[in-house]
Image: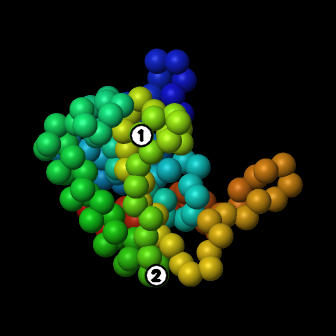
Amino acid sequence: MSDGDRCIFCEAQKDPANDEKNFVLYRGSRNFVILNLYPYISGHMMIAPYAHIGELDAADKDDSDEMMDLVKRCQVALREVYHPQGFNVGMNLGRAAGAGIADHIHMHIMPRWAGDTNFMSTVGETRVLPEDLTTTYQKLRPKFI
């Protein structure tokens, strides 16, 4: 989430030498692919432009075109690694629409299966996922090389 002037997407893109630590899977010319640090389900990825913009209609056409191309590339990677039965793809624009990071647009893509429940809640409202982010990164990263 944003923390004052700090933006997690702007921070993650600054240091290519730490892409693995920051869970950046791929860097395009105008956008990058990153794992969601608080995934709804294993394989939950996001595509964000390098430009710090809060509205989709403010994005350059080249930014939005590459973003959609990367959504398709992520879909292929998720299909090959997780063999899902479907996908959720979308973006929340503005806090009222559910954007946790409202000042930097980003597209979500996640694999889905019939009957999945996204996550299991346990004591203390903690989410439990079948694999940790490092494992997810190691599975998906080769699909972007």
Asked if labels 1 and 2 touch by Cβ distance under 8 angstroms, the answer is: no
Task: Identify the residue shown where x is 53% and y is 57%.
Answer: 134
Q: How far apart in space, not on screen, are marks 2 and 1 (Cα)?
A: 27 Å
Disc 2 element = loop
Q: As shown in the figure, which amino acid type bears the numbered disc 1?
A: Leu
Q: As shown in the figure, which amino acid type bears the numbered disc 2?
A: Gln
Front in this rendered view, residue 143 or 62: 62
What colour-coding does the image apply?
Answer: rainbow
Q: Where 44 falls versus 79 (above or below)?
A: above
Give the image location of residue 77, x and y in percent. Answer: 34, 70
Front in this rendered view, residue 98 or 49: 98
Horizontal side of 93 relative to 50 (left or right) equals: right
Task: Identify the residue shown where x is 81% and y is 59%.
Answer: 122
- Name, please, the residue furthest toward the right: 123
Q: In the rendered image, which quarter is residue 119 located in? A: bottom right
Residue wearing tag 1: 93
Give the image location of residue 4, x and y in percent. Answer: 52, 18
